[in-house]
Image: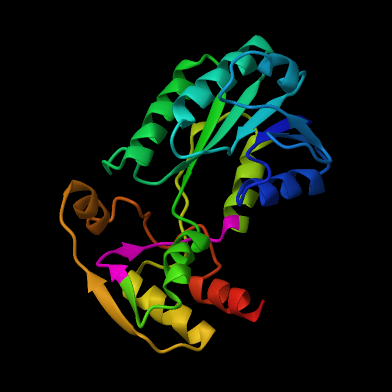
Amino acid sequence: MKILVTGGTGGLGRPTVAALRAAGHDVRVLSRRPGPGRVVGDLSRSGGLEALIGPVDVVVHCATNRRKDAPATRNLLDAAKAEGVAHFAFISIVGVDDIPYFYYRDKVVIERMIADSGIPFTILRATQFHDFVAMFLRPQRRFPWLTVLDIEAQPIAVEEVAKRLAELAVAPPAGRVDDIGGPERLHLRVLAEQWQASHGTHKRIRMLRLGGKTVRAFQAGHHMTALPGYGTGTFAEFAAREAAT
């Protein structure tokens, strides 16, 4: 099967491309930078994308710049439809229709675009990756304490999301499929404690209590799935591996 992956050099894209190639598929990566197995293109520009997509069976859309994803996806959908792509697979986030955060609202818009495009599609929503949690802890290494929000999270291993997305991409289009999440729902304080245990630090953890609709939506758990989650890898295991490297 011939597959084009956008965002194939990113955190999710790399293991997705690896999983698809390991299964024997012909995979190309749409990127703004040249490299082996890549086609060079920019989703923010509508012209010429058809030629870059070419004759492929599936487009797996992982690319994001967090600001202009909706118009970029419109350009990609138009080009994919013009080229007769038979399956459009998209990665989204759990809770996007219940959490009034601008990035999540864009995901809702994009999901509707895909559903209305006329291209057979699959949309997979996942909880936040382990590295997303770590991203807020790493910059605080030089601080005398760690600060976390007063919410729970259900992080999942990016490799497990990539595996599921790759499976769905080569299966028949299935529309919106079941959401996936990590194996544990833990308070950010607990995740910070696990992070510290792996990295050998013992800083005080401060709770940042914020108000507003977005925070209340997170506190209500709209960004998580029911347990047991799809994933099996824990945040503690992720933190230990990262600390070891």
Above/below status of 224 relative to 35 = below
Image position, residue 134 (x, y; %): 48, 67
Quadrant occupied by the N terminus: top right
Q: Residue at x 74, y 15 (%)?
A: 51
Image position, residue 24 (x, y; %): 83, 42
Image position, residue 22 (x, y; %): 80, 49
Q: Residue furthest top?
A: 82
- Residue 152: say if magenta: yes
Image position, residue 39 (x, y; %): 76, 30
Q: Residue furthest left?
A: 211
The quadrant in which residue 98 appears is top left
Quadrant occupied by the C terminus: bottom right
The quadrant in which residue 221 appears is bottom left
Above/below status of 75 relative to 99 = above
Q: Residue at x 49, y 71 (%)?
A: 235
Side of 164 where 178 appears, left or right: left
Above/below status of 68 relative to 20 = above
Side of 154 where 240 appears, left or right: right
Which residues are the magenta region? Answer: 148-158
